[in-house]
Amino acid sequence: MTKTALIPRVRRDRHGRAIAVRCTACGTWRKPHRFTRNTVTCRRCPYGPVGRHLAKYAANNR
């Protein structure tokens, strides 16, 4: 069993709806709409492809 299997990735309310999802890359809890379908990293994650693109963009425009 892996370490990520032991850590819950989704928080649900009492009706079973997902209210927060943990990003596997940065470890922060974010709302479900911050994730694209069938992904485990959030769109705003500094360690994901979008974060790397934004960091590169900011470095080039200094």
Image (cartoon, rainbow, N blue to C red):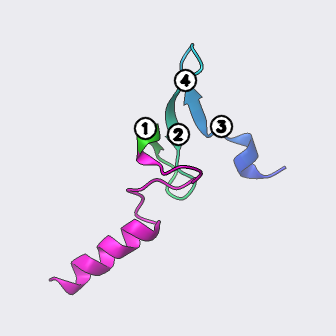
Q: Looking at the image, which residue sits at the far left?
A: 62
Q: Which residue is the site of mark 1?
A: 31
According to the picture, the residue beneath numbered tag 4 turns out to be 17
Query: Magenta residues?
Result: 34-62
Which x, y percent locates residue 25? Answer: 54, 59
Say which amino acid is labelled 3. Pro
CA distance separating discs 1 and 2: 6 Å
Q: Which mark is residue 13?
A: none
Q: Residues within 10 Å of mark 4 (few under 14, many from 20)?
A: few
> In the picture shown, does residue 29 fall above or below 2?
above
Which comes before the other along the chain, label 1 or label 2? 2
Mark 3 → mark 2, Cα distance in angstroms: 9 Å
Disc 2 marks which amino acid?
Answer: Val
How many residues crowd around disc 2 within 10 Å: few (fewer than 14), some, or many (20 or more)? many
Residue indicated by mark 3: 8
Residue depicted at 39% across the width and 73% down the height: 52
Mark seen at residue 21: 2
Disc with the residue nearer the chain's start (1 vs 4): 4
Point out residue 61 in the picture as x, y percentages from the top left corner. 16, 83
